[in-house]
Amino acid sequence: MIKKKIMRLLAVMLAAFLLLSGCSSQKAGETGAAKESGDVIKVGILHSLSGTMAISEVSVRDAELMAIEEINAKGGVLGKKIQPVIEDGASDWPTFAEKAKKLLQNDKVATVFGCWTSASRKAVLPVFEQNNGLLWYPVQYEGMEASPNIFYTGAAPNQQIVPAVDWLLKNKGKKFFLIGSDYVFPRTANQIIKAQLAASGGELVAEEYTPLGYTDYSTIVNKIKAAQPDVVFNTLNGDSNVAFFKQLKDAGISAQDISTCSVSVAEEEIRGIGADNMKGHLVSWNYYQTTDTPENQQFVANYKKKYGQDRVTDDPIEAAYDAVYLWAAAVEKAGSTDVEKVKAAAKGLEFKAPEGLVKIEGENQHLWKPVRIGEVQADGMIKEIWNSGEAVRPDPYLKTYPWAAGLSN
Amino acid sequence: MSIYLMQIFNGISVSSILMLAALGLAIIFGLMKIINMAHGELIMIGAYMTYLTQKVFEAYGGSGLFSLYFIAAIPAAFLTTALIGYVLEVTIIKRLYGRIIDSILATWGVSLILQQLARSIFGAPNVEVKSPLWLNGGLLLMGNLQLPYKRLFIILLVTVCIIGVYWFLYRTATGRRVRAVMQNRSMAESLGINTRRIDALTFALGSGLAGIAGCALTLLGSIGPTLGTNYLVDTFMVVVLGGVGRIVGTIAGAFTIGIGSTSLEFLTNASLGKVLMFLLVILFLQWKPQGLFTISSRELDG
């Protein structure tokens, strides 16, 4: 009998514990929300806070909340405080669409900062277009898109992938092995790379895709060994990167033997992979934590102060932070949060971002950004080894590249 | 030539990983007919225990002891997940025997809770487990054929686990009772076996094995809240293909799927290889729904 009672007690305690921890995480999510009900401007924040993408999107949300807090501390926009409404897309694309609809129709938010994967962006795109909403999308992507209702603050392919391939062809060799996760971004990115290789005398030795969440790369590493490429161009996403780099190293292949260049691995991901597993490998982005601008020193210091010294900043985090400032500046300039007025005001708007001066290109609502190629260091930071000098004009459809003529359709 | 030899080794290595992950599941599924969707999360907890052990050794162990943390992590992971498994059994699972659909839903709920709990405690991004120095590198055989020590270690670990489980089930009195309950629950009850105790014990053992799997997987893959879900489908496939309730079935199932899928991946590509492997398993189960090995039982409701 006593035993039974103990078991009951244990069950109740377990339930209470789970309930409590659930509540506490809820609270953590709301701390950024201003509580005044009077003069506020509501904005939506829509990221995966649970599920497989939470790994990347949680820190992007943190950056957005930090930017909002900073702007509020300086008096807000149009004299009003910004109030974030946070929704969880739960790594599930239909949920993203549903939550986007809720933010636009029920909460009537002025704008939304959100999404990470191209799949989630494609899922919410019709919602934003139908409701004439405004989305700020902070992640590098495959291009071939320019919705009038989306501002893209991450890199277009010509600001990340194309210059990286150019640089690799010049400095590392002609034989390319393409490896990526099996969904829209890597496949489109590889279409672009193949066209570029064909035009610039590169050679494609193999192209491999693995399902998202794939964990065993021994066979692919074996294929890489057999093919002896000069460069492995890596568009794997999420957890797979950890497995790939650990197993590549175990097979005795280091960055000296074969260069890899990744476009979805930033400082945050390197922490999970382990810096010594990735030391010497290359990445291509627009921003690194080590980027040397006064704005960035301030940004990194603030971020670490707010979220902990062990946290790192990276490209999508920075792009999300920029997005909030760009939107606020556009609203100030327009004198209104009306979507059409904000869009008109945003054209040509400049911002001294941590990555350097960025500018909104009116024609396609992407950003002019500098391009940087970096090498992973033993401490997990990335050392810039090449940059484009000045900001590169965004060209999501690659119209200015003759070899890309057949790609955009 | 060495490419093909390497590929054979890869097949064996993948089989050993599947075996380790599926062993606990097979025992739980075999004994209790509970489809434990939270098995992946128990693997995840084992991986996080390894991370914690590493942190403890980093803080208190000094550099000499640090390289041994992995050895300490294995029992730590086993005991923690076994304890969590035990608590789960006595609080939730025991109310669900004989209700397969309910058990799927309830354990799936548990898996989501555990995932979010890990996210609240350890944060959403992956954490890093530094593999001990003595497991870095590999055994160099003729030319460029290099067998990574980590994979050899996992094969060894699996062998030890299987021998241990075999010894437990076939050489100890408790093991005999477990098998008796597995084969005919009501008859075992009539003979005075405390099936409640056996159930809880077996569930804890199965969970503990998941913990060891989690510990080993930190060597090869990511350590994050969703680690377990990446392995769940493959482990279920191993158990179903192998046949319920026999260790030898799990071993055979793991070898078939491990070697089959790596070979198919080598010949085609990863996505297509997986599809083909699923297709073959489905066709096989059409022909032999019981799987590769079965226990013949006279139980009426069997």
Image (tube, coloured by chain):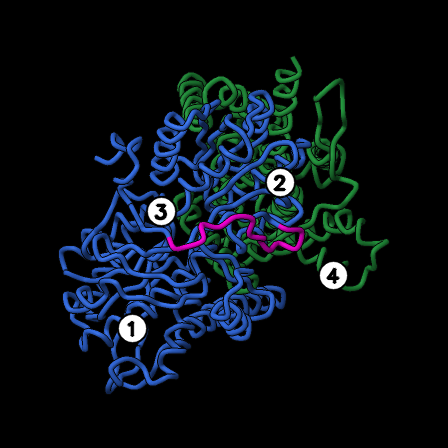
Chain colours: A blue, B green
Q: Residue at x 58, y 47 (%)?
A: A375
Nearer to us of marks 1 and 4 is 1
x, y percentage for residue B59?
76, 64
Q: Is residue B107 left or right of residue B70?
A: left
Three-letter residue code for mark 2: Lys
Of A393 and B218, the residue lying toward us = A393
Task: Indicate the chain on which mark 2 is placed.
Answer: A
Q: Which mark is residue A328?
A: 1
> Disc 3 marks which residue?
A141
Residue name at image x 25 percent, y 46 percent: A145
The secondary element bearing badge 3 is classed as loop
The label shown at residue B56 is: 4
Crowding near the residue tagged with mark 2, few <14, some 14–19, many ≥20 C-alpha atoms within 10 Å: many
Q: Is residue A309 left or right of residue A61?
A: right
Q: Secondary structure at mark 4?
A: helix
Tag 4–tag 3 contact (CB < 8 Å) = no
Assign the magenta stretch its main secondary structure: loop
**Which secondary structure, mark 2?**
helix
Checking the image for residue A246, the label placed there is 2
Q: Who comes first in sequence, dot 1 or dot 3?
A: 3
* Chain identifier of the residue bearing label 1 in the image: A
| Residue located 37% across and 54% down the image | A154
Q: CA distance from mark 4 to mark 3?
A: 40 Å
- Residue type at tag 3: Tyr
Q: Position of residue A75 (x, y in %)?
A: 33, 85
Q: Residue furthest right?
A: B64
Residue A129 visible somewhere in the drawing = yes
Q: Give the alpha-carbon distance from disc 1 to disc 3, as whole Å.
A: 24 Å
Considering only vertical position in the picture, is A95 above or below B181? below
Q: CA distance from mark 1 to mark 4?
A: 46 Å
